[in-house]
């Protein structure tokens, strides 16, 4: 991976990147086709690129452009200049010597990790002629559905603002600012009256929208027969079947050691655990994102998870991150937003009532309130099918109102609202809660959460055709269940208990709040390891399979829900393994 | 009313001779003086029947008061079991516990040296008032600016506790205390003859250095409640339960508000009177949860060391009273240990309860406590189903059996050699059901399934 430093400093985008460096270079698997990422810790870069080179240099140019704007770039430059003074650097071989110096001092590894991180969030380059919205979501009907859904949310938020007479945003008077800043660490002790506020939407409202999705170009009349879909999701998306999943998730196979199985008390630690922990320590000391990601596929030991996840997400907690967090905090203290109430309400409704997470109430406010002010989150809308809501400040009174894109008058001052463009819904805080288990400092917690959000969680509540998107997950869940356990599926469908109606809430939260924390973290290890949310759909199906016997006996939706009400005793890894690898299909 | 006085010399029950087949009782008559989880557990146990006050019983779950009134006047048959030791206050009263620990520490220092004695430094500096008032004042002046906590020795559940930083505060208290003690006179129970002189007039308090840097999770203070079962003091045989919980204070910790006792006391009993207490909210974590949390933050080695230090507290505190507690083979006792962690992950012993609250505060809590009590009964083994050589019974691991108990771990590299790892699993996976299935013979009269 030497070449990256060359590229970064020379502006030449030579196509000399892939694979041959000494460090594990991110492999560039195909994107357009359905054989996706999971061979090695995958990074999505277009397929054709491998052969053509043009697309690759485009991607490189894009990464270089982005990295040049970072602090890492100036740091590298400074280090390189510093390095010039060293005696072992000769003028004749300046280039190579400086490069060798950067490699030895660990800066090259930092650069690699940064590049790796960029590749993770790099939107798939489309055809040069394609519009930017094509990069967000290639299918027009998906885009439209998402836009329609956004209109509904905005309407609801606007009417909440008018009905309750609560402005979308207001500056806090000085005494109030002081008070808030004093109790920053104990915001949970405040008991504001939130009875008027309702969550803007709950997962089940969102499910209705997904159920009504249709592809206008798809003729469904021919589909009767073996291909017919008994489930609720009726859009033709190509999701992986079990055979493909087995290949993609090969590292979960029965013969490969897994934390969450092979670390149990009856298995002697020497067989797998000790060696795995030793390896984990080495990965941490090497500070290599790619290696950490690969490692995470077999699960992270509890004591190393915090470091490993931060490494995978390249969340380095530099002084600038702390500064950035403090600025966001100042933003919270200065301005009161309507969405703050939604955050308060959500935390009170979910995390504060949870047996495990109630302790972290204060952390959740400290993270979520700052998150809502973070405009750098907006970047992820270049590859998210969702579009951040705009609001305009009307006339003289400075009243803010949310508007549908394109409708604001030209003289109005248009801003994104909330500043990060993400409107929290019922259960949103559960994306953060499990992370409180890993990180003590709000700042560190914040940067890890933000990275998790812009890589994964946003996909769980926006309508898109991405394989990790919620629509694909729903479809995949239904397909898996239908193929694996047709009798169960049929039975549940007949009694009016469509499986997705039960499983949807699990998947929207990536199971947070449903599994016990240790099991949840084992699951999220794999999300990070495989860089994909598909495992969530597999687990949902596996849970049904596990309780199949009891489910066959129920006769109504409510009794089916009762059978599946408590997932806190489940062991994730055995369920996944059995479902994927030990079931005859 | 002759009772064979059993002061329990080092008799042969250390090696626990295997009980003869058929010794197990098919019916156990029990008496239960408490109405909570324990009653349900006793009631549900196959073959156990409740008897009323005057009837003969085989098993008695009584409160301490009953024991003190009746124990000395009753004749107890060989097989009979009762849930307290006669003078358990040596361990459970705050002043006596400290006194015993201080004495034990001194003996150790003399016999085994400084290093060994330092292993007893797990209780905050404590003085008994009014007896040690002068010693206390000396220490107080030496440690200017630190915070102290006053606790009445004989009361529990956080009653009568307050914090102070100035001597003046306890001057006021002394005046008030004299008035109160007139009313309190009747309260003092279990005091020994030497206590019953002048001091009897004033309610005894302990003044204890307050731990000013408690370990906080998300700004909240918490303490651990851990259960230890002692089935014999001579030789000492103690079992440690795997489950337990961390109790969180509902408000946030800061030393600036020392008047706010709700912050400082994590007793659920105190929390319940806090103005914003929500009974639906159970401010507890299972110990497993806490152990995982700490492991995630500090790594496995650190946390293992912490839990070893906690084990050390149990063992040392029990050894410190071993010689003064009147051993009796009829007695066993379940203790609730309160442990506090500070920011350096050092555990501190706060107190030991002989009648830990068995009232459940939630469904989860109820289940945990039921299992705890069931396993207590398994260990006490009225039914005679154990061999006496078990190292684990349900959720209980044998921690001390006249000496440390080790796990048997066979290493794969050097087959056969066993390593010396303590046989304790506090906050680890509780595989009690599986273990019990494997361990226990069916109840007498029941057919093996």
Image (cartoon, grey):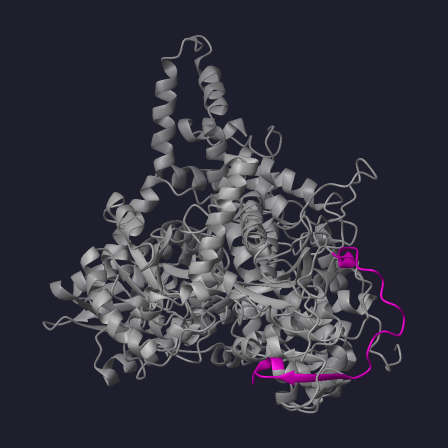
Left or right: residue B257 versus residue A64 is: left
Q: Nearer the viewer, residue B107 or A76?
A: B107
Asked if residue B405 is positioned above or below residue A275 in the image, the reply reads: below
Q: How many labels does the image show?
A: 0
Picture residue at 85% right of the left edge, 73% below the top: B23
Main SS of the magenta part reads: loop
Question: As rendered, which of A542 and A68 lies closer to the eye?
Answer: A542
Q: In this view, does B371 lie above or below B148?
A: below
Q: Does the magenta stretch include residue B30?
A: yes
Observer able to see residue A183: yes
Q: In this view, does A506 lie to the left or right of A182?
A: right
Can you say which quadrant of the picture contains the C terminus of chain B?
A: bottom right
**Image coordinates for residue B90, horizontal then vertical, percent:** 51, 61
What is the quadrant of residue B70 in the picture?
bottom right
Q: In which quarter of the view is residue A235 placed?
A: bottom right
Q: In which quarter of the image is residue B414?
A: top right
Q: Where is residue A291 in the image (x, y as percent from the top left)?
A: 59, 39
Foreground residue among B196 and B348: B196
Q: For the point 42% across and 78% down, which residue is it? A: A201
| Residue B380 is one of the magenta-drawn residues | no
| Residue interval drawn in magenta | B11-38
Task: Tell me the residue at 70%/66% (across/down).
Answer: B329
Q: Which x, y percent locates residue A2?
A: 52, 27
Residue with the most extreme left position: A396
């Amino acid at each position: 991976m030497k070449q990256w430093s060359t590229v970064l400093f020379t502006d030449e985008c030579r196509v000399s990147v892939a694979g041959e460096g000494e460090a594990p270079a991110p492999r560039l698997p195909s994107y357009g086709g359905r054989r996706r990422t999971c061979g090695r810790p995958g990074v999505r870069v277009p397929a054709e690129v491998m052969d053509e080179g043009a697309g690759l240099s485009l991607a490189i140019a894009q990464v270089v452009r982005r990295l040049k704007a970072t602090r890492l770039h100036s740091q590298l430059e400074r280090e390189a200049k510093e390095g010039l003074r060293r005696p072992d650097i000769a003028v004749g071989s300046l280039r190579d010597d400086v490069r060798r110096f950067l490699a030895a001092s660990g800066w090259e590894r930092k650069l690699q990790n940064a590049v790796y991180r960029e590749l993770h969030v790099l939107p798939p380059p489309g055809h040069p002629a394609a519009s930017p919205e094509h990069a967000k979501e290639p299918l027009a009907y998906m885009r439209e559905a998402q836009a329609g859904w956004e209109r509904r949310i905005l309407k609801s938020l606007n009417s909440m603002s008018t009905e309750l007479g609560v402005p979308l945003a207001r500056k806090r008077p000085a005494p109030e600012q002081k008070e808030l800043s004093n109790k920053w660490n104990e915001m949970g002790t405040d008991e504001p009256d939130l009875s008027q506020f309702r969550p803007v939407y709950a997962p089940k409202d969102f499910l209705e929208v997904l159920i009504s999705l249709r592809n206008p170009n798809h003729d469904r009349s021919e589909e009767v027969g073996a291909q017919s879909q008994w489930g609720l999701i009726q859009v033709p998306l190509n999701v992986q079947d079990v055979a493909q999943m087995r290949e993609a998730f090969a590292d979960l196979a029965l013969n490969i050691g897994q934390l969450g199985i092979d670390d149990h008390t009856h298995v002697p630690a020497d067989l797998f655990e000790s060696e795995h922990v030793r390896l984990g320590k080495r990965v941490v000391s090497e500070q290599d994102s790619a290696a950490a990601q690969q490692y995470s596929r077999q699960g992270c030991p509890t004591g190393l998870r915090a470091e490993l996840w931060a490494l995978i997400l390249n969340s380095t907690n530099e002084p600038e991150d702390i500064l950035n967090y403090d600025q966001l905090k100042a933003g919270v203290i200065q301005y009161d937003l309507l969405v703050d109430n939604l955050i308060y309400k959500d935390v009170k409704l979910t995390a504060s009532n949870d047996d495990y997470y109630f302790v972290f109430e204060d952390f959740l406010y400290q993270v979520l309130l700052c998150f809502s002010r973070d405009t750098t989150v907006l970047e992820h809308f270049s590859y998210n099918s969702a579009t951040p809501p705009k609001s305009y400040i009307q006339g003289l009174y400075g009243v803010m109102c949310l508007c549908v894109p394109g409708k604001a008058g030209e003289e109005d001052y248009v801003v994104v609202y909330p500043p990060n463009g993400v409107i929290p819904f019922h259960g949103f805080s559960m994306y953060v809660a499990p992370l409180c288990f890993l990180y003590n400092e709000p700042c560190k917690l914040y940067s890890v959460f933000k990275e998790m959000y812009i890589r994964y969680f946003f996909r769980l509540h926006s309508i898109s055709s991405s394989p990790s998107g919620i629509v694909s997950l729903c479809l995949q869940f239904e397909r898996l269940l239908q193929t694996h356990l047709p009798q169960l599926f049929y039975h549940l469908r007949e009694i009016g208990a469509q499986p997705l109606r039960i499983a949807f809430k699990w998947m929207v939260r990536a199971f947070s709040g449903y599994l016990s924390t240790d099991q949840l973290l084992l699951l999220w290890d794999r999300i990070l390891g495989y860089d994909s949310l598909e495992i969530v759909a597999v687990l949902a199906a596996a849970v049904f399979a596990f309780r199949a016997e009891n489910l066959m006996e129920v006769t109504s939706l409510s009794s089916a829900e009762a059978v599946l009400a408590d997932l806190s005793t489940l062991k994730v890894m055995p369920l996944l393994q059995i479902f994927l690898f030990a079931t005859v299909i | 009313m002759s009772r064979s006085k059993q002061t329990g010399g080092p008799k042969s029950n250390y090696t626990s001779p295997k009980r003869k087949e058929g010794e197990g009782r098919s019916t156990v008559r029990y008496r239960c003086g408490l109405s909570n989880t324990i009653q349900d557990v006793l009631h549900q146990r196959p073959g156990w029947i409740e008897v009323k006050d005057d009837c003969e019983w085989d098993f008695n779950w009584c409160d301490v008061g009953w024991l003190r009134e009746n124990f000395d006047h009753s004749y107890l048959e060989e097989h009979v079991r009762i849930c307290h030791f006669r003078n358990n206050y040596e361990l459970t009263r705050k002043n006596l516990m400290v006194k015993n620990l201080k004495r034990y520490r001194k003996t150790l220092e003399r016999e085994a040296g400084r290093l060994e004695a330092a292993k007893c430094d797990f209780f905050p500096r404590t003085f008994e008032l009014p007896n040690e008032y002068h010693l206390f004042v000396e220490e107080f002046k030496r440690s200017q600016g630190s915070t102290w906590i006053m606790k009445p020795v004989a009361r529990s559940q956080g009653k009568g506790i307050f914090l102070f930083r100035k001597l003046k505060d306890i001057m006021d208290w002394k005046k008030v205390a004299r008035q109160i003690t007139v009313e309190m006179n009747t309260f003092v129970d279990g005091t020994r003859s030497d206590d019953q002189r002048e001091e009897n007039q004033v309610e005894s308090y302990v003044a204890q250095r307050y731990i000013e840097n408690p370990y906080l999770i998300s700004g909240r203070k918490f303490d651990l409640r851990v259960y230890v079962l002692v089935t014999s003091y001579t030789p000492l045989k103690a079992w440690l339960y795997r489950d337990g919980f961390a109790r969180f204070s509902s408000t946030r910790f800061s030393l600036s508000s020392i008047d706010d006792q709700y912050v400082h006391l994590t007793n659920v009993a105190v929390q319940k009177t806090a103005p914003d207490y929500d009974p639906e909210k159970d401010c507890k974590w299972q110990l497993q949860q806490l152990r995982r949390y700490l492991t995630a933050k500090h790594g496995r080695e650190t946390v293992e060391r912490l839990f070893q230090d906690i084990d050390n507290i149990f063992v040392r505190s029990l050894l410190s009273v071993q010689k003064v507690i009147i051993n009796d083979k009829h007695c066993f006792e379940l203790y609730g240990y309160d442990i506090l962690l500070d920011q350096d992950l050092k555990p501190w012993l706060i107190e030991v309860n002989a009648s830990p609250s068995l009232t459940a505060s939630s469904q989860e809590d109820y289940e945990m406590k039921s299992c705890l009590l069931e396993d207590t009964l398994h260990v006490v083994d009225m039914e005679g189903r154990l061999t006496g050589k078990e190292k684990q019974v349900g959720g209980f691991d044998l921690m001390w059996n006249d000496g440390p108990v080790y796990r048997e771990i066979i290493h794969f590299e050097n087959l056969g050699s066993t390593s010396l790892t303590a046989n304790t699993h506090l906050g680890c996976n509780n595989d009690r059901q599986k273990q019990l299935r494997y361990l226990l013979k069916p109840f007498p009269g029941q057919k093996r399934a």
